[in-house]
Amino acid sequence: MAEVPTINLALYAHTDVGMVRSGNEDNFLILDLSSGNSWTASEEEPQELLTYSQGYYGSLLAVSDGMGGALAGEVASRMAVETVRDRMLQLQAHEVYGKVPFEERLRLAIEEANLLINDDGQSNPAHKGLGATFTAVATQGNRIYFAQVGDSRAYLIRQGKIYRVTKDQSLVQQMIDLGHITEEEAETHSYRNVILQALGANYLVNVEINSLEMCQLDTLVLCSDGLSGKINQDEIAQIVNKASDFKSACQTMINLANERGGEDNITVIIAQFSGSSLPVADDDAIEPQSLARSPDTPTEINWGIGAKTDPLNQSDLKDQKKEEISSKATEPLPPPPTQSYPFTSKLVKETSETTARTNDLSDRRGPITSVFAAMDFEEKPGVESRESSEADQRVTQPLASDESVSSPADPVYNKPSSSEPKKNNPADNPARRNSKGSLIIISGLVLLSAVALIVVLSLYLKKQSEQRTVQEQEVEKQNQKDGKIGRLREKIVEINKRLQAIEKPSLRDKRESWEDSLRKLGTRLDGAAQMSPNDMQLINQVCDEIGNELKKIEDEVNNLQGLIPQQQNNRDPVKV
């Protein structure tokens, strides 16, 4: 085991429900990978994890922001932190996965959490649509690894300066990268809450991992968007640098976020690293190194594999197989038959010379690719070979008139005698044979043409069917989009009518505030209406957020005293 540098951690974590939400869907994880001690949002504050020395296996800090209806968001964030915690401890203790690089074990653990959350959302109707962001900071030795899924953030404070070391996987961040909007415009953009990656949203997830070297007194701040959406990074650095301890710094930032609205849950982790073996930071800009997924990293965890079936060391396995193959003795070929059986016994007379030549394999070069038995060459009684039949009909011409040229050993062909009657066999007619062959060829061509026509026709019909299916799906998506947006517009009109019925002067400011909120929601609906029906997932997310805001406004309006109930125009007056 390599020498472990002495690194001390001082940290604190805190989460708050905020000022609007009824439940807390955020969660966090503090994990000492060497001792196995951990701390999540649902557990009491452990004193042994507030300050400790990092061991050989390192440490892991993470923030997760859940999303989904009812309690689904809370379930997703809890599953995320607990699954990553358990898998990291199991992977490092495994015979095979313990040899995987540290950053790839982190990637595997997060991908496993994605699979479990996605499976729960598919199988449990109450948890349909659940998901969670996940931002993690893992340290081993003097290296820091940042893992990102979603839009929670990690900041690094080094020598009083703060740097954002993770990149949001969100729609507005993509628009910033393309140059369509600026960072300042993104903070108030109507799509600022639309994220492109989340644990559980799909079967596959893109885990982005970066790394950099740890320096003396590096301070890391992890937070959910409930904090980063209300406090900018310069304010975060100022609060952390001025605070007497990290607990008070966490509380100060949460209080400030709540004072500025507190519409979302708020979670923050602060951790500082120190040690004599850590280098002092210089003034160079921080450039985290992006770590792409290794091709040797398996796509799923298989706990059943061991050293004999290690998929991560394929080269060793191939070398082992080569040694096993080379160590085996080559089995000799079976001896050739003592007597050869030529294909055309009528053409070549068997002699001792030909037999010896056939059986002799000494001059053969290269491997024997086929092995035959003697019975494969035996001729069936009453059946002539094709070569023999043709040879019987041939007429040989002598090469010279000298009779001494011929020898008894030369093959002799029987010339048909003119005195013998010639049999009128239709099969011997060359013209008939040629016409029959031509007919077979034409039939084959017709058959091939028919098959090709059928294949082309089936492909055409399949393409037409696929196009109709795509058109029907597009129409269905468009109808679904128009229906969602239309219902929300009707709700806005309905609430506006109720607001017009409020005549109390004391409620005028409140009414104007609601009317302004309704106008903003209408603008967001206009933006959703301009989106393509193919982006139905984003449209649903935007509509759900607008629907939730409308529900809050409607509930507040209903609770006001003096609100005139909605009248029905077709109702007749009560007669006395």
Image (cartoon, rainbow, N blue to C red):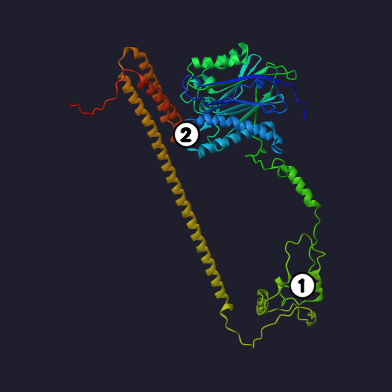
- On the image, the x and y values in percent for residue 569 come to 24, 27
- In the picture, which quadrant includes the N terminus? top right
164 relative to 84, above or below: above
* Residue drawn at 50 percent across, 31 percent down: 72
| Front residue of this view, candidates 548 and 398 | 548
Q: Is mark 2 on a helix, strand or loop?
A: helix
- Taking the view exactly as shown, the residue that stands out farthest to the left is 576
Q: What amino acid type should be assigned to the residue bearing mark 1?
A: Ser
Disc with the residue nearer the chain's start (2 vs 1): 1
Occupied quadrant, residue 371:
bottom right
Q: Residue 537 carries which label?
A: 2
Circle 2 packing at 10 Å, graded few (<14), some (14-19), many (20+), is few
- On the image, the x and y values in percent for residue 218 come to 67, 18
Occupied quadrant, residue 26:
top right
| Front residue of this view, candidates 214 and 464 | 214
Residue that mark 1 sits on:
340
Q: Can residue 91 be seen in this view?
A: yes
Horizontal relation, residue 548 to residue 80: left or right: left
Question: Which of labels 2 and 1 is toward the front?
Answer: 2
- Taking the view exactly as shown, the residue that stands out farthest to the bottom is 419
Circle 1 packing at 10 Å, graded few (<14), some (14-19), many (20+), is some
Q: What amino acid type should be assigned to the residue bearing mark 2?
A: Gln
Horizontal relation, residue 28 to residue 460: left or right: right
241 relative to 52, above or below: above
Q: Can residue 197 be seen in this view?
A: no
- On the image, the x and y values in percent for residue 428 come to 59, 78
**Spatial separation of the CA atoms under disc 2 and disc 1:** 77 Å
504 relative to 102, above or below: above
Q: What element carries label 1?
A: loop
